[in-house]
Amino acid sequence: MSEISIQGLVKAFEQDKNILNGLSFEINCGERVGILGKNGAGKTTLFRIITGEVRPDEGRVVIPSDRRMGLISQIPVYPEGYKVENVLKSAHERIFELEAKMNELASRMTNETSDAILREYDKAAADYERLGGYSADSERNRVANGLEISETMRKQLFSELSGGEKTRVNLARLILEDTDILLLDEPTNHLDLKATEWLEEYLLKFRGTVLAISHDRFFLDRVVTRTVEILGGKAEFYSGNYSFYVDEKQRRYEEQLKKYEKEQAKIAQLQEAADKLHLWAFMGNDKLHKRAFSMEKRMEKLRQTDRPKLDRAMKIKFAEREFSGDEVLVIDGVSKSFGKRTLFSNLELIIEGCERIALIGDNGTGKSTLIKLIIGEDVPDSGMLRRGPSVKTAYLPQIIKFDFPNRSLLDTMLYSEKCTPQGARDRLASFRFSGEDVYKPVSALSGGEQSRLRLCMLMRGEVNFLILDEPTNHLDIQSREWIEEAVDDYNEALLFVSHDRYFIERFATRIWALENGTITDFRGGFDEYREYLKKQNELNQNFKSKENVKEDSSRSFRKNPSAYNEKQLQKTERDIARLEERLKEIELLCEENSSDFQKLMELDVQKAETQKELDTLLAKWEAQSEQSCSD
């Protein structure tokens, strides 16, 4: 069944330039669709049209009237004094209304017990249970914990949060709402690795429809089942995830190129024949002109395939300086605090030549602070950082700023880089800034374009220690690939902060995981590190399970040592343990099926039956224990 129907959308923001030019496609109920396209291709405009924020010049969007929709990029304005907890609770307004109604009806039933009031109460109670009223508090906690919205943040005023924190809270609110369609515009931009993976797990279980604009290739590979690329204002369709899209796009390119070359060869053959006929016709046989004209008409009919284009890669390469010595950077006993909060303490690390290190960790753990210490923008509370004598550093910050944003790109290069006009133009052209673009003010560039310009400026000298802080943020997939090509060609020491799992996996040969004030220094790639974490978690769980078994056994023995070895009592205890495990499994299933109300009702019935059976066994165990004591 069609959930969203996009029919011939046309939208222009500049005269004679359609950003969407007849865009049409259908999305079926329950699909998870990735929307791809370069920055400026019209992806966000499409979302704004779907939500009704922007009206198209032509075409329409058809969505069933009973479908509820949420857009993550839109952050509502809440009343003054609203705290984060109020925002989260706003997702359960209907539940709170039913709860108030049930309390009112219960109060009335103390004085009157008419059938009408009882029926009204039963209906409200059924709706309350269907909407998950009994588990609303635990569901809020689960979603908030998954997106790392701490108890402290939940007590803060929503208006005082950063843009990224507001986006996370808004995402949590949308997840908690009974939403049928989720529109996600770069949902992972403000999430760290843990929160991103939690969101992926949620979306994989979500039974509604998802449209996601994302440049996170890991996210697209894991979550989406179909891909739509906006190209030239129209839609290209791919029936798979990002990896499928990449392979299929290349296959289509090769197929179209083959068809184009075949057509051109046939056209060239006909053109040669037509030219000969025209030549012979001039020698006295006018009828040959007609045959030549007929061939030329056939040639026009053959011109059906345009020559396919692949985006031209940027010719970028970091200049490198030969490194002499063993140590690029020594971090010796470094600590840093802000007020009473200690970010990290007594760090002892060494970076050697040619190493590629990914600095990862949750938001707020101090990754950017450590980078600032390394580049000298801040000083540690204790310890020291020492770079090798021949080390020359280049640094790309997470937030790009320019001292003179009103200067043109060309003037920025001339003033900052002390290069010739032709040299500035050549360097800008290698980063896809050419023609009239070089006269644009820097302030008119998008975030991704500003990152490109800053990278262009980084190439001014020989570098043997490159530091990148979230280098792929705000970049479309094509721009990310351009930067990756440049980093791929760079062979000296590299330290980077990133939440882009594709980028980390491609480049990291060593992982620095910052958590709880310390760094786990893992020598290996990102996949190896994840496997290491998985094994550590399994070992910890096995250890806890064994400890719990020992504790339960000793507790059971202490309660009734004289009857501990009796077979009947042991059997009852085993049955009790089995039912307790079953209750835990049901709780986990409730969390996994949190958006499937029908399944939750079935699980509630199973839970009640299991609990009843467990209560019976506990009573039986008490009776057996008393009998053993009297023996």
Image (cartoon, rainbow, N blue to C red):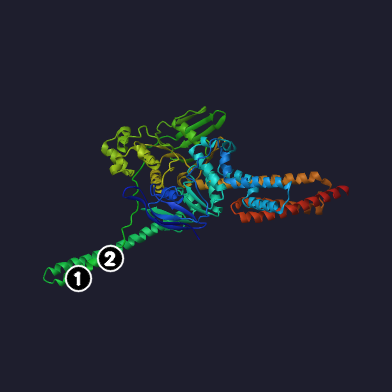
- Report the residue at 18% width, 70% height from top: 290
Spot occupied by residue 63 in the image (x, y as percentages of width and height): 48, 55
Crowdedness of circle 2 by 10 Å Cα count: few (<14), some, many (20+)? few
Spot occupied by residue 53 in the image (x, y as percentages of width and height): 44, 47
Looking at the rendered structure, which numbered label has been put on residue 68? none
Horizontal side of 273 relative to 557 (left or right) equals left
Q: Is residue 104 visible?
A: yes
The answer to whether mark 1 and mark 2 are in CB contact below 8 A is: no
The tag earlier along the polypeptide, 1 or 2, is 1
| Secondary structure of the residue carrying numbered label 2 | helix
Q: Name the residue carrying label 2.
A: 301
Q: Name the residue carrying label 1.
A: 291
Q: 346 or 426, which lies in front?
A: 426
Horizontal side of 177 relative to 118 (left or right) equals left
The amino acid marked with disc number 1 is Arg
Q: Is residue 149 visible?
A: no
- Report the residue at 46% width, 37% height from top: 352
